Amino acid sequence: MNFWGIVGKTGAIAALCLAPALASALDAPTGEVVLTITGNITEKNNGDQADFDIAMLEALGVQNFETTTNWTEGKTAFSGPTLLTVLKAVGAGSTKMSATALNDYTIQMDAGTDDFPGPVIATKLNGEEMSVRTKGPLWLVYPYDLDQKFQNELIFSNSIWQLRSIEVAN
């Protein structure tokens, strides 16, 4: 059973207990850096920021689900860690954040709550790593088909592809 099937309406925070144990300190990435997190965080591996490569993100625990989207054809399979899991790994002091794409598209959002789980940072689309051309290397994506609460303009606008950075608010 996947993350969304386990969590259902009970919330994402409780499901974090199911995620693999997270190290107290972040290792430095050995591959290409695909995500940088700054702001209100306690765990850093590059000065005042936390850098991640794909392997580091996937080591946090991968969640898998299929959904239809406004940007793909038919059911599409996504996998990657939950945004809340990544924020926990960096010791985020808030779930309020801004996220920025490679083209500088920036959103302000809340990463999720017990009653409204946030997105997955998808590292794979249909089992394959995503190139910039295919909306990668990272895509904030929700299980749109799971519940009506994932089908509104705010959620769609928060579904940022080509994600490159997150700044956690104070």
Image (cartoon, helix red, strand yellow):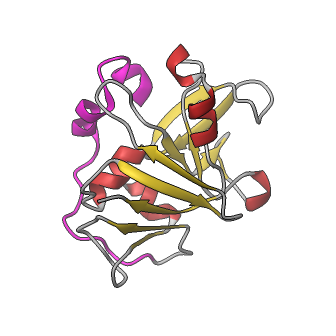
- The answer to whether 115 appears left or right of 110 in the picture is left
Q: Is residue 18 above or below residue 67?
A: below
The quarter of the picture where residue 41 lies is: bottom left
Q: Is residue 80 visible?
A: yes
Please identify the quadrant where the N terminus is shown.
top left
**In terms of depth relative to the viewer, which is nearer, 44 or 6?**
44
Per the image, is 26 magenta? yes
Q: Is residue 97 left or right of 113 when viewed as pictured?
A: right
Name the residue rendered at 33%, 78% in the picture: 45
Residue at image point 76% right, 36% down: 71
143 up-or-down from 16: above or below: above
Image quadrant assignment for residue 90: bottom left
The spot of residue 9 in percent (x, y) is: 35, 17
Q: Position of residue 92 (x, y in %)?
A: 28, 57
Question: Which residue is pictured at 37% across the width and 75% down the height?
Answer: 49
Image location (x, y in percent) of residue 89 = 29, 58
Q: How many marks?
A: 0
Residue 80, image x and y in percent? 50, 46
Where 73 falls versus 48 (above or below)? above
- Placement of the C terminus among the 4 image quadrants: bottom left
The residue at 48%/38% (across/down) is 119
Residue 147 visible, this angle = no
List the single residue furthest toward the bottom.
Answer: 47
Q: Is residue 87 magenta?
A: no
Compared to residue 33, the image places residue 155 above or below, namely above
Given residues 164 and 81, the one toward you in this image is 164
Residue range (magenta): 1-29
